[in-house]
Each structure stands twice: as C-alpha cells, then as structure tokens.
Amino acid sequence: MNWPVMKYAVTQYPPLHFRALCMVFGMVAMWFVARQMKVSLKVPREMWGRLALLCIPNMIGWHLFCILAVKELSSGRAAILGYTMPVWVVLTGLMFAHPVGRRGWIGLSLAMVAAMLLLSSEFAAIAGSPLGVVLMLIAAASWGLGTTLIRHYPTGLHALTFTHAMMPPTIVAMGLAGFWFEGTDVGAPQGWSQWWPIFYNAFGVFAFCQVAWFSLAKSLPPIVSSLSIMIIPVVGVMAGSFFLGEVPHWPDFVALVLILGAMAVILVPGRKKVVVG
C-alpha cells in the first residue's frame, strides 16, 4: 500500500525531505514502542562498526535511491523494479558462498517471470524514464546486498533495536542529500495532504513494517526472506489502480499466481523421505 502513498507524497513535497521527516517521526514511534515492550535500544560499542556497515546498503542505499526513483516512475513500476531484489540477493550471496538450492532457483525463476509479466505493458513508459529505472535498480541491488550481509554479519540485537540504531545515520544522509539536491529553503509540510503520508510512513512503514522486515531478514535465509515479500509488488500494482487510477492488465493477475507459486515453493516444507527397515 505504501507505493502509491509515496508516489502521492512526492508530488506534494520534496522526496528527500519527505523521507527524512518520515524517519524522524518513525524513530520517535520506535522509541515509544520499545518502552512499551521493555526492549533496550542500547547498542554495545563493539557492534557500532558492524551496524554502520549494514546501515549503508539496508537503509541509506535503499531509501535514498528508492524515493528518488518513485518520483520518476509510477508507483506500480517502481514497486516491480524494486522487488527484483531477490536476484541481487542470489548474486551477492554467491560472493559469500550462500547456497540457493533447487527450490530456491525454481522460486526465483517464477518470481522473475512474474516481474517481467508485470512490466510487459510498461516497457515503453519505462524506456521513457531511464533515470527512474537506473535509480530503482540501484536501490534493489543495495537492498539485496544488505539482506545478504545481515545474515553474514549477525548482531544478535532485537529487530527494534537494530532498526532504531540505523535510523540516525540514515536521517543525516537523507537530510544532507535533501539540502544538496532540493535546497535549504524547503518549508515545513503544509496541511493534512502533506502531513498524512509522513505519519503513515512513520508509524506504519518504519515503526512496524521496517522492523518486521529486519526480523525476517535476521531469522531466515536470504533467498527465503527475499522471496517471501514478492507479493508486495502485486499489491503495489493493485493499490496503484485503486488510489491512482493506474489500470491493471491480465499479466498482473497471471503474475500474482506465479508469485504465490514462488512463495509456496520456498516457504512450504518439502516432503521428508521415510526410510523403511
């Protein structure tokens, strides 16, 4: 649902300033949640370097390039290109000798065929927005690398602590990029039309979804966690249709079936062989 919300938001307010404000309020929301859950947000000093390494691809790279790409593309196209992430998970995982397995390759193939189907009616439009395509693919590659690194460099931190700790450097990066590319004379958001997407992202996306994602990424193999979220671009396309009038086509529905198949291949346990005798 957040893809059309982001697309709407960046037509109302500069994208980098928007993302920085979302994170500021999201960080406050995380602090309240942590207090209610009695989760410590303190990070051991020996983990600072590792968190800095993980923050660059998982937070700064993904959110910076993603929000800039959304301004150039429709919400559905941005979602589809962003969720080529499993390909980058596999490619970066090979660098660390992470096994993929037969089921992983089958699931990945189904998911990528689905992505191509979702893009089939959009090639002309995408060709007309090369900057948006490049930015979104960089964001997806950054996210894929980050997902692989989370499993390769574990921190042992609670997902809420893990996410909260990476917010300040990301806010600084977004703020600096905003000042550089959008200027220093951007005023505060005006009216409910500019504020509600910020609060939606702060509480719904960062305080909940981002934490939930990192919890998955920390506990599941990268190929499994990456394919488990492939339903999101389909929701992005359908939500774009409902909220923004972007019309879905038959490939969108076929892609939904393929993505559900990919998730089933990856997430449903295989049969165990029974040895008799």
Image: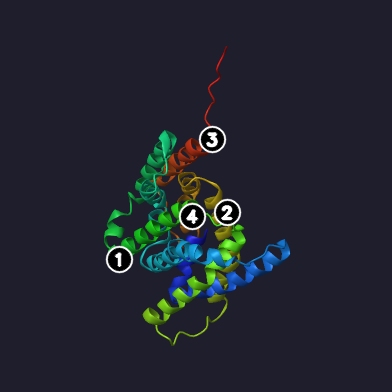
Q: Residues within 10 Å of mark 4 (few under 14, many from 20)?
A: few
| Callout 1 touching callout 2 (CB < 8 Å) | no
Q: Residues within 10 Å of mark 3 (few under 14, many from 20)?
A: few
Q: Is residue 194 left or right of residue 108?
A: right
Q: Is residue 229 visible?
A: yes
Foreground of the two, 153 or 276: 153
Q: Residues within 10 Å of mark 2 (few under 14, many from 20)?
A: some
- Residue type at numbered disc 4: Tyr
| Callout 3 touching callout 1 (CB < 8 Å) | no
For marks 3 and 2, give the CA distance: 19 Å
For marks 4 and 3, give the CA distance: 27 Å
- Residue type at numbered disc 2: Ser
Between marks 3 and 1 in the image, the one whose residue lies nearer the viewer: 3
Residue matched to label 2: 215
Foreground of the two, 14 or 102: 102
For marks 3 and 1, give the CA distance: 38 Å
Q: Residues within 10 Å of mark 1 (few under 14, many from 20)?
A: some
For marks 1 and 4, give the CA distance: 32 Å
Residue matched to label 4: 153
Residue matched to label 1: 131
Q: Position of residue 242 (x, y in %)?
A: 50, 57
- The mark that comes first in sequence, 4 or 3, is 4
- Residue type at numbered disc 3: Val
Q: Is residue 237 visible?
A: no
- The mark that comes first in sequence, 1 or 4, is 1
- The mark that comes first in sequence, 2 or 4, is 4
Identify the residue at the far top of this view: 277
Residue matched to label 3: 268
Between marks 4 and 3 in the image, the one whose residue lies nearer the viewer: 4
